[in-house]
Amino acid sequence: MYKHGFARVAAASPELRVADCPYNADRILDVIRQAAERQVEYLVLPELCLTGYTCADLFLQRQLLDGALEALRRIAEGTAGQRLIVIVGLPVDIKGRLFNCAAVLQNGRILGLVPKTCIPGYSEFYEPRWFAAAEELETDELLIGGVPVPVGNDLMFVSEENDNLAFGVEICEDLWVPAPPSSLLAQAGAVLLFNPSASNELVGKADYRRQLVSGQSASCVAAYVYAASNTGESTTDVVFGGHSLIAENGQMLAESERFTHESRLIEADIDIPRLQYSRMVMGTFRAGRGSRGYRTVRFCDPACALPAGRKLARKIDPSPFVPGNPQVRDERCQEILAIQTSGLMKRVRHIGSKQLVIGISGGLDSTLAFLVAVRAMQRLGRPASDVLAVTMPGFGTTNRTYDNAVGLIKALGATLRVVDIKAACLQHFADIGHDPEQHDLTYENVQARERTQILMDLANKNGGIVVGTGDLSELALGWCTYNGDHMSMYGVNGGIPKTLIQYVVKWYADHEADETARGYLESIIATGISPELLPPSPTGEIVQLTEDILGPYVVHDFFLYHMLRTGAGPSKILYLAEEAFGQGYAREQLIGWLKVFYTRFFTQQFKRSCLPDGPKVGTVSLSPRGDWRMPSDASAALWLREVEELSGAAASDAAR
């Protein structure tokens, strides 16, 4: 595989003339040359593209069958000296039966022939008139040019260099049936699935085709590459559009324009290790089950012959937790609020809580938790006043955050309580012998724990529970005070990353808040992220900005996503970050933040090991009862060693 395990795949729909095999071979060779120039490793071409899918009874003519085999030999010869894998469709007669086959070619050789399993004979399809199904095959080998070639739908193509790199092939209709062969190929280990197809166009069919390809890539946890015949096919009864698609685990990476006569090629880079990691995580997937039923055909990994420095042919999202499409993002935010609200409602019903007690700071996290608490009470048919919202100004509280907190509480009709914690903290400093002028970790955490004590005691006094406010990003970095803001009786934000919270609050402001509440919410969104535990500036401005200390949350959320969701290590995460953020951050900055991330992620696990209950919201979660189980005393040495190597390499590059 290429750098960090990316494999470049392509689907092409070349120009064709029905029944003109020499012409079709020329066009296919042109596409192969184009693919080689783009450093493609795997290329799939349409079903029966050497002859055309619409040859009808001409398929039974010896001239056409011989012409197709001759064209296949030409194309195979055209791949000599290359490691590029080419998959091309043609009719092949075997022992008196005709089979619709996909030939797999590499470096001048025909590695194997895969016949179509499901032969459609309904509506506009008449394939049983000419073709037999794969199950009717009575041999597992065919001589082509005096060379034995394995044939069958039981072929698994496996890399000579890496047993974990394998691909399989199915043809057109095979995907449209209840149990596609690709499902079994995937369970047997194939991470790349190729489909040479014809697939004519009908109104609405393109959408269904997208759903099939995307859905199959997701259920197989694989890349699915689909190439369909273009408009050069016969239009006697139907029209073909050349619709090619590339999907990876449910995500559409590339799609061709339809209804063009000239040759079209689309490409994308597939993250093979990410697919393999996802399969390992899914205990129900169990890649390898049933693999004994497949014959192994070895191929040379095309990536081994590629030069270094190939530009990545896929977009890396700098904010993987935040959908880029505004409509999808709005739907996501609405669903998140629904999940949080439903979880809290269940807890209130079960306990019979008289009140929900929550600390409001005027920051994003406590604001979202407060909105969820109010929504939960409203949906339970109870007044917002059953939410006891406590704002607790301390040494770092600014007028802006205090005013926003008080204003929002009043606007939503919750019960407001103001408890100034400064005197209590000064008394505690005296009790433990701490100089209040020493603004260290003790100075900060005393305030956080004092606030939590107040909330817990108010909950006891009023028959309520404390609603937690900490988010997923803070949990990953351990940016919370142990047994302070780290603790609650139900944490509604624990599954939501910092980069997404502002959008959830914005959705509420736009769709559920009145004009007064909306004004406070917009001001809160625009406020810098801070725990406000250090005194403000002489002009009353926040001086303790979290991102100045830790690094940008957008970067740390990116690191978190790719560590937990894709299984990437430090060097790959850095590579992806440089692709995602471009010139936004220097390499040295990213490496520095990566060191902060791994150091804090490992050393702060003890805080995550005793988290309060709270709902899982997305695919990444750090709950010790579900997604993430990690020893609190695990060593980060291997990860940090790799970060240090990256740092050394960056310094060496800078010196040159």
Image (tube, rainbow, N blue to C red):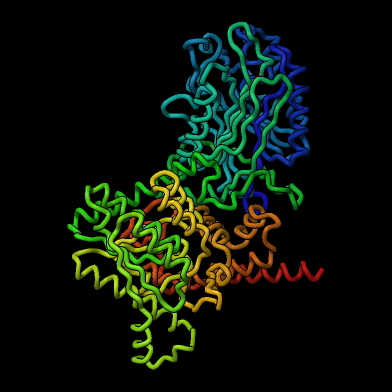
Tell me the quarter of the picture where residue 494 sits. bottom left
Looking at the image, which is closer to me, 634 or 449? 449
Looking at the image, which is closer to me, 438 or 584? 438
Looking at the image, which is closer to me, 201 or 17? 201
Left-right relation of 120 to 112: left
Tell me the quarter of the picture where residue 241 sits. top right
In this picture, is 606 found above or below 21?
below
Q: Which residue lies at the image location 75% right of the left edge and 37% below the top edge?
A: 36
Number of residue marks:
0
Going by the picture, which residue comes out furthest to the bottom? Answer: 433
Tell me the quarter of the picture where residue 79 sits. top right
Going by the picture, which residue comes out furthest to the right? Answer: 656
Say if residue 626 shows up in the picture.
Answer: yes
Quadrant for the C terminus, please.
bottom right
Left-right relation of 176 to 256: left
The percent coordinates of residue 503 (x first, y second) are 48, 51
Q: Which residue lies at the image location 63% right of the left edge and 45% below the top edge?
A: 315
The percent coordinates of residue 398 (x first, y second) are 47, 71
In this picture, is 95 found above or below 481?
above
Left-right relation of 315 to 359: right
The percent coordinates of residue 521 (x first, y second) are 45, 55
Say if residue 612 shows up in the picture.
Answer: no
The percent coordinates of residue 287 (x first, y second) are 46, 45
In this picture, is 563 found above or below 591?
above
